[in-house]
Image: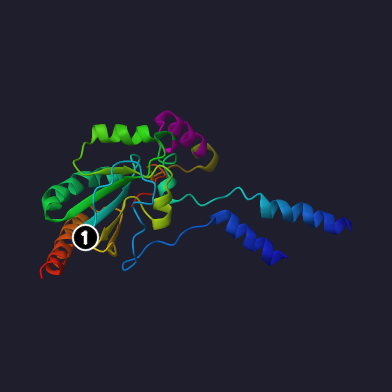
Amino acid sequence: MGAVAAAALVVGANGAYAGPLKVGDPFPSLQKAGLKGVLPDTAGKVVLVDFWASWCGPCKRSFPAMDALYRQFKDRGFVLLAISVDEKEKDMEQFLKDHPVSFPILHDARQKLAESAGIEAMPTSFLLDGKGKIVAVHKGFNEDETAELLKKEIEAQLGTVRKEKTP
Amino acid sequence: MKRCFVLILVVLPLVFLPACTAVKPWQRGNLAEYGMRPDRDPLDISLREHIFFTREAAAGGRGVGGGGCGCN
């Protein structure tokens, strides 16, 4: 009885928590995630899915670097999807008014995608290859270090995608 | 019988009414608000420090600032 009660307490305290996605896992369907906003065409492209929120300081610091990456690689088959997990849409809109960016913004209003991705820190970004498989995960944003790493990983993936397309 | 009743009275609320929950990283919007910062009010901090000093003959130890977003 005690063991059952203890187990029930643990479950009650922690809730159902989806395990974090790892390198090699397929990323959950973006089309079925119920995201608000216009989802660009991602088929066969290298995609960086970045979870952010208006209340998250490191996310704010990551935006200029993300924008630079997007501008640098967007014409080479790279898509950056910044997914806001803000509970209030107006917080997201105000943030974007103060920090305008050129990459697509989507809103995970019900936070379902964030939950199925099992993100462990804010921001968290997932780099996906042309087939939608996770090739890199970045938890948090360590200024230039993360930006440089992302740049190298995106370049490597774009090279791989180009080779696959070449007959 | 009475012992069983007491046991149920104690155990059932423990099982079905847990008030604690794990706040997930994407749910920390409210925790990250300015009002949640322990260092949001300098006057309040100086008063608390004064009370702490008079009671404990020690001061300081409030070096950690920031909100509760747990980012990075």
- A131 vs B51, left or right, is left
Q: Which amino acid does label 1 sit on?
A: Gly
Is residue A155 visible in the rendered structure shown here?
A: yes
Front-most of A164 and A62?
A164
Residue found at the far bottom of this picture: A167
Report the residue marked by disc 1: A44
Q: Residue at x 15, y 62 (%)?
A: A158
- A104 vs A119, left or right, is left
SS assignment at label 1? loop
Q: Tell me where residue A148 appears, x and y as whole percent.
A: 16, 57
Is residue A118 visible in the rendered structure shown here?
A: no
In terms of secondary structure, what is the magenta stretch mainly?
helix
Q: How packed is label 1: few (under 14 Cα within 10 Å), some, or many (20 or more)?
A: some
Front-most of A20 and A161?
A161
Determine the chain carrying the residue at label 1.
A
Q: In which quarter of the image is residue B64?
A: top left
Find out whether residue B30 is within the magenta segment.
Answer: no
- Name the quarter where the N terminus of chain B is drawn: bottom right
Colour scheme: rainbow
Q: Tell me where residue A156 appears, x and y as whole percent.
A: 15, 65
Identify the magenta region: B36-52
Find out whether residue B49 is within the magenta segment.
Answer: yes
Residue found at the far top of this picture: B43
- B45 vs A48, left or right, is right
> Does residue B38 sit above or below A40 in this rendering?
above
- B1 vs A80, left or right, is right
Residue found at the far right of this picture: B1
> Does residue A141 sit above or below A99 in this rendering?
below
Q: Which residue is drawn at 24% across and 32% down?
A: A98
> Does residue B36 sit above or below A69 in this rendering?
above
Front-most of A121 and B35?
A121
